[in-house]
Amino acid sequence: DEVAFTWSHSRGMLHAKAQLQDFTGTLLTDGYAAYTKTVEQLNQHERQIVHAACWVHMRRGFEKALDSEPHTAQQALDIIATLYRHEKHIRDKQSDLADIHTYRQQHSEPLVTDFFRWVYQQRQRTDLLPKSPFAKALHYTAERESQLKVFLSNPALPMDTNHLERALRVIPMGRKNYLFCWSELGAEQLGILQSLMVTCRLQGVNPYHYLVDVLQRVALHPAKDVLDLTPRVWKEKFADKKLTSDLDKMG
């Protein structure tokens, strides 16, 4: 896994398109409408981006509906909880991609089919107010049906963006500690540094050892091979022969 924190003036489409202009693959996001529009526009230009949606963000709508629709909202939450138990089973077994795909097809896909059938049945209710929390949750879910089903056909894809949300916490935590960034350039540089640090953690690399090595190695390393110095590749090529600092040598 690798993480990149980028800075922009807003969450608008222009920034998303700039970041994704060379991307091909599966994009997992929350339900923000700009992401859907961005993918649609990029795919019009012969791009091949599959847009997947996060189940945790969808689930929150039904949580908000518990006060007004405790029984029916709980039905949705129970189905989602069962799906996550299947995902836990997959993680606990440390299954390979082929086994994950087979398991999801056998256990998760029937549940997802039943879930969306239930969603459309609930949307037919004549007593449901359009602006109620439950109706909004149903609408949000139905609009993203195809995106929410992507994980069933892609065994490498998680059901949600929770791992990304956890990685993102370093930004607001830091902002609270050092009271924001002084400039736009500072925000960009912070994003680069935090990207490296969080990716180190995801790769099981000690950030201190990584920085001590890379800050010395970068002066002599060929510019065309700069990707060698990203945490993931560095772990493979240099972790066993890392450079140390003078302080480490004195110790």
Image: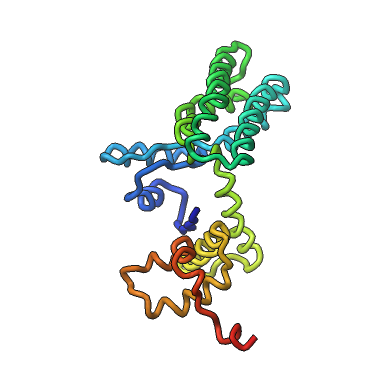
Q: Residue furthest top?
A: 126
Residue under the point 46% across and 63% down? 236
Q: Residue furthest left?
A: 46
Image check: 3 left or right of 224? right
Q: Nearer the viewer, residue 127 or 236?
A: 236
Image check: 116 left or right of 85? left
The total number of labels drawn is 0
Q: Is residue 127 above or below residue 223?
A: above
Across and down, in percent, residue 196 comes to: 50, 64
Across and down, in percent, residue 37 comes to: 39, 38
Q: Nearer the viewer, residue 80 or 136?
A: 80
Quadrant of the image for the C terminus? bottom right
Q: Is residue 59 above or below residue 215?
A: above
Model colouring: rainbow
Q: Nearer the viewer, residue 12 or 49?
A: 49
Residue under the point 52% across and 59% down? 199
Q: Quadrant of residue 221?
A: bottom left
Across and down, in percent, residue 106 comes to: 54, 24
Q: Is residue 91 above or below residue 75?
A: below
Across and down, in percent, residue 85 comes to: 65, 32
Q: Quadrant of residue 197?
A: bottom right
Q: Residue furthest bottom?
A: 250
Q: Nearer the viewer, residue 85 or 51?
A: 85
